[in-house]
Amino acid sequence: MPQLIAGNWKMNGTLAGIAAYAAALRPASPGAELLVCPPAPLIAPLRAALDGAPVALGAQDCAVKRSGAHTGDLSADLLAELGATHVILGHSERRADHAESSATVSEKARTAIAAGLVPIICVGETEAERDSGEAETVVRAQLAGSLPEELAGQTVPGVVAPGIIAYEPVWAIGTGRTPTEEDVAAMHASIRAALRRQLGAAGATMPILYGGSVKPSNAASLLALPEVGGALVGGASLKAEDFLAIASAAARD
């Protein structure tokens, strides 16, 4: 299965920059699946600018409810209508800045699946939790609380897996720091074991992305590790050439 390289633009990107970005992606054939998650207002215009190129689009969050009196929220159904196929949920910035609990993430994932979106559920430990030896315990608890039962045996038309996990150590996001390769491999193995216990057969094949200061210089070594099914890329995804360099590093059977 090709690895998935997902770009999380966060609160960056403009209408003016879409044409050049899309022009750089359209002819690319890096051997990995590409997914770009811009701010929600840019999903539809970026989809148009890509003009049918094999690049999936995703959102960075969705509401718990599918519709109703929820000012400022974005429904999963509307995101799908705009052209999104995936949605990032439970990112550490949402958990910290908006006090999102794992239970909330699970409800959002359930709503996303009902709307036909593939949830990318983020988990990861803080530096203090890593230093105290609690990293795997913390991540397993996040998985237990964040994954809805619908991910076991659920199918979404046109996609290989109905859900994706992204492991992002909080202390590595945007800092330029990354865990050792041994730590990444150990955490991904722990996540895989937890997924098998929690979701059965579905958990044995669900992709596990690594995120946290992924860049062209370290992508090849990180993406070659066991159980690393791709990358969730932050700042480096804002430059098409860097994003494509990471995707090229992921190319393998």
Image: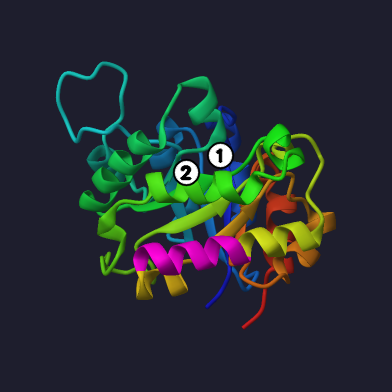
Q: Is residue 139 visible?
A: yes
**Is 12 displayed left or right of 49 in the figure?**
right
Instruction: Say which of 241 and 198 sits in front.
Output: 198
Outermost residue, top direction? 71
Residue drawn 48% across the image and 33% down it: 39
Residue 112, horizontal then vertical, whole percent: 29, 46
Residue drawn 73% across the image and 35% down it: 127
* Type of amino acid under label 2: Leu
Question: Are circles 2 and 1 on residues that touch, CB within 8 Å?
Answer: yes
Whether 50 is among the magenta residues is no
Whether 198 is among the magenta residues is yes
> Quarter holding the C terminus?
bottom right
Outermost residue, right direction? 217
Residue 70, horizontal then vertical, whole percent: 22, 19
* Type of amino acid under label 1: Ile
- Disc 1 target residue: 18
Instruction: Give residue 197's quadrant in the image.
Output: bottom left
Tell me which label, 2 or 1, sits earlier in the chain: 1
- Distance (Cα) linking label 2 and label 1: 6 Å
Instruction: Say which of 238 and 184 sits in front.
Output: 184
Q: Is residue 22 visible?
A: no
**Is 238 displayed left or right of 60 in the figure?**
right
- Disc 2 target residue: 46
Residue drawn 70% across the image and 64% down it: 185
Q: Does dot 1 land on a helix, a strand or a loop? A: helix
Q: Please rate how many residues cluster around mark 1, counting C-alpha atoms within 10 Å: few if below 14, some from 14 to 19, many from 20.
A: some
What range of the chain is rendered magenta?
A: 189-199
> Relative to 7, is 90 above or below?
above
Q: Please rate how many residues cluster around mark 2, counting C-alpha atoms within 10 Å: few if below 14, some from 14 to 19, many from 20.
A: many
